[in-house]
Image (cartoon, coloured by chain):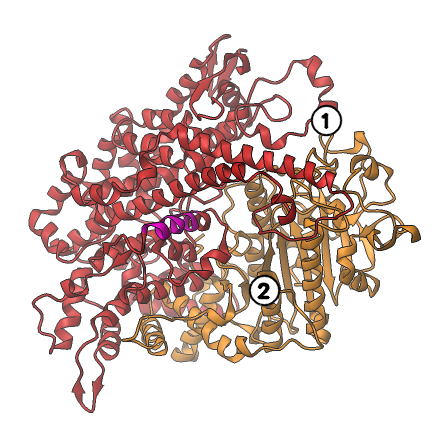
Chain colours: A red, B orange
Amino acid sequence: MTAFRTLVFCVAAVSAGLGANARLCGAALNNPSAPTAAPAAQTEQAPLTEREKAAHALNRLGYGPRPGEIERVAALGVENWIRQQLAPSEIPDFAAEKAVAPLSHLQMDPAEIFAAYYTQIRERRNRVAKASAAAAMAEGKAPETMSGKESKLPETTLAKAPAKENKSGEEARRVVAQAVGELHQAKLVRAVLSERQLEQVLVDFWFNHFNVDGRKNAVRAALVTYEQDVIRPHIWGNFRDLLGATAQSAAMLVYLDNVRSSAAAPASAAKFSGKKYARGTDDNMTKVARPATKRGLNENYGRELMELHTLGVDAGYTQKDVQEVARAFTGWTLVPRTGQFIFRRDWHDEGEKTILGQHFAIGGGQEDGERVLDLLSLHPATAHHLAYELCQRFVSDDPPAPLVDRVAKAFLDSRGNLRATYEALFLDPEFFAPQFYAAKTKSPFEFIASALRASASTFVDAPATRNRERLRVIEAAALLGRGGERTNALPRKTATLHLVDMGQPNYGWGPPTGFPEDSSHWVAAGALVSRLNFALALTAGQVPETRPQVRRLVEGVNPDQPAALVDAIARNMFARDLSASTRRVVLAQGAPSREGEMSVPDVPRVLALMLGSPEFQRR
Amino acid sequence: MNPGISRRFFIKRGALAFAAIGAGALFGPDFLRSSTLAAEPRRAVGGKRVLVCLFQRGAADGLSMVVPYGDRDYYRLRSDIALPAPTRSAGAAAVLDLDGHFGLHPALAPLHELYKAGELAVVHACGNPHGTRSHFEAQDLMEAGTDVDKTLLSGWLNRMIGVCPEDAARHSALRAVAMTAQMPRSLQGSEEAIAIADLARFGVSGGGASMNASSAAQGFEQIYENAVGDALHGAGEEGFAAMGLLKKVDPRGYVPAHGAQYPAGTFGRSLRQVAQLIKAEVGLEVAFVEIGGWDTHANQGAAAGILANRLGEFGKGLAALHRDLGEKMSDVTVLTMSEFGRTARQNGNRGTDHGFGTAFFALGGPVRGGRVLGKWPGLAPDKLHEGRDLAITTDYRDFFAEACVRHMGVSEKDLARVFPGFETSTNRFGGYLQS
């Protein structure tokens, strides 16, 4: 009844030309359980059953249930399962480890990948220089041939550069691209196969919180170590350690430009800086570890550190604070070509500073930055900001304030212990409040990972290794926003390429905000069509690196009973019954009746329709 | 604000619900009328105006597109890559004169015709006055419609759709289309928009031998049709509505009119698809197209070379669109944009590095063209931005805002919603459209 009345009010508002409350009503229409719109309905909802709780936990702390898993978690006890997930080192994880092991570029020394990036840049510069010389020699012959999009040079000129150097440049480029492609592969493999589900979700969460964009300069060369060495080992400990690790990471230093931030030039030098600027030409050479064209402060990291990493926007800090924080981090930079963190005292602004009301004395050196991180990491605004983000990821797009406050309190009470903070969130009774059940829309990555899990898909190492390697390079290019032609030319898209189609190129997202945690971002027609196509491709065995185990879904079910079969598949994916309408369509399409007789059900088709259904887009 | 639910989508749903429930629903409670949350519905107007936005990704060299041949400093700064002034002795390498001071790159000859016909205007020294020199940051900021606010997640075009009046009869799943695989930042947001790289391939397909595509699509369509009460119900219906409309368009069978010849490649295909959608009258209001390859750090060439090839494709594509659309061009305005320009001085590799101001074009029937607009800052050492780049004298948001108001009918007061935190008004407009 409530829903009906809400509907009527909306219609009235619009037809009267007022448009009043259109959004609110729209929300009520589309999500009857939206807490703000229908508080009356909320209290009437029954608490979740054990089965529903198990499915909810699997969907929120992990990437969705595999066949039979809802029952297993319910039998174990949902709280027990959550406690296991909170102690991942005790969970054996052979399948995921075995599947990730062959990805050899993930074992490389980070400095080696970083060096490869610079080889690539240097080779390109050499080629350009050589080609310029060659072009100058062959004067009168204007270069006209158009080379590929990537190349900056006409083919004819490029050909004149010595082949050997081209090869090492090409090799260096391949190493970096291969590493990015493998990183993505590992992310998907772990999401699907790992028993340590919460850990995988948290790595994704914190990477997104401390987002870096692989498309920017040298960031791509630091992605692997950023996820594996900076984020992953620190997500169970103290927030201060995680924050400190990101602050000194090559990826973050390059991404937010701190790598080039230094004390402002002395006044005498500044006077001539205009002239110097006009003459300074080596833009490409100054990407790392040298202050750009002129020395000076870069506020980028200082601002995002407070706005996104810790305090949150509108937390009361000022532009002056941003500048002072940036001053504190001057000299936090990288060793060129290895990407190792180094503090350069000669770049550091040693003057007095006042940050968030605290006095920093002259000559603080590297300690200036460390003290800022201390201050920020345990600030109440930080606790609230992090708690809100966690609740938005794990509970609801619009999480209830009291829950956020309780999680923030756990963070502060434990002096920033992350495991204690997660525990407070997942074991809070409100975590299982019925209005949050299936209330979030899956992100494209969550959709793909959960579809692979629901279909019991395995990973296959086909086709031939040689092609696989090239494929990773194409994938990396697609994630980093390039090579559309090569992608389109592929006969079949990999899961990673499908992901790009759906609008979530992991590791290639520009803004430092990361992908939106508000899941309504993912409700869009074009992307939804891409999801349907993925469901069809997967179930037909046309996603080259995976094989769904369709038979496993219907073990022990009599194939002559289409309805029982559809229900069996659904029971593995959802804790609740399919909506009557979806079930009807699935049944009609998956086991069409001919001349009054039910035909043998087409299991892949039944599965495809369910994976593409609105119900499966939820978690 | 919940960006997932488009107001327009709601209105559409609301209208359906109204039809089902009947006139009894007209009695609305008073509190709704006085609600401070009230958002005005889009004003309905006639007409079939279309705005096409064309992003030149990679930072296009404005000083080579629209050459300030009357500025002596230009030749001082670019000894190897400058284009000669339009004198008789310069021949085919010379720029095509626009107004005695500026000239078009010779590879843009097709656009010169449109300039002379009064349908192409240039705004020079345009850009984001607080922008950065990172491609991705600068593109993000420009597409978001802001100068520095990185927290703005929706795009300016999407927000514009939310405040521009619409012809009530034109509700369409193909109202805002990006000819790209991913939704560009410009069109992200709560208003319905769709990204389709290839019209001929947009649809539900695959499924192997056991399942033919049309029946799979039918199954999904029924599921989403029935899923009333689910936010995805709308997204699904929009997707299938777009597919349905595209059947009418018949993308595979399209033949451009008036002998128009689009350049081969993605860019030409994108523009051809824009023309197709406009001619098919499927309700297109906003189209987004992109063309890459402008990051000319080395050997960019002058009258011939890499940049000239790129410009050739760019100019031919726009001219083909113009020719193909014929009379329909009277309802179409095309804006071109790029995240920043390039250094005024050539670098050691006969290319140019990341710069600041660049040239933006406005093309179409409604454009008062044949003019180079914007204040020219000059290229003298003390006039260059930070001593190295063409300065910016026109904020790109003023350039966009003029099309919002004078082409798409956005009210002046609603501009603040399209460009938050930016104060613009009609007296800041360059005047490339009739007021």
Seen as rendered, the residue at the extreme top is A362
Say what amino acid the circle numbered 1 marks. Arg
> Subunit of mark 2?
B
Residue B189 visible, this orientation: no
- Neighbours of disc 1 within 10 Å: few (<14), some (14-19), many (20+): some
Which quadrant is home to the C terminus of chain A? bottom left
Please give left or right for residue A100 compared with residue A160 in the image: left
- A286 versus A581 height, above or below: above
Seen as rendered, the residue at the extreme bottom is A595
Nearer the observer, A431 or A589: A589
Q: Give the residue pinned by disc 2.
A: B270
Image point 16% across, 58% down: which residue? A67
Prevailing SS of the magenta stretch: helix
Nearer the observer, B303 or A445: B303
Residue B335 rendering spot, x and y as whole percentages? 68, 57
Query: Which circle marks residue A338 in the picture?
Result: none
Say what amino acid the circle numbered 2 marks. Ser
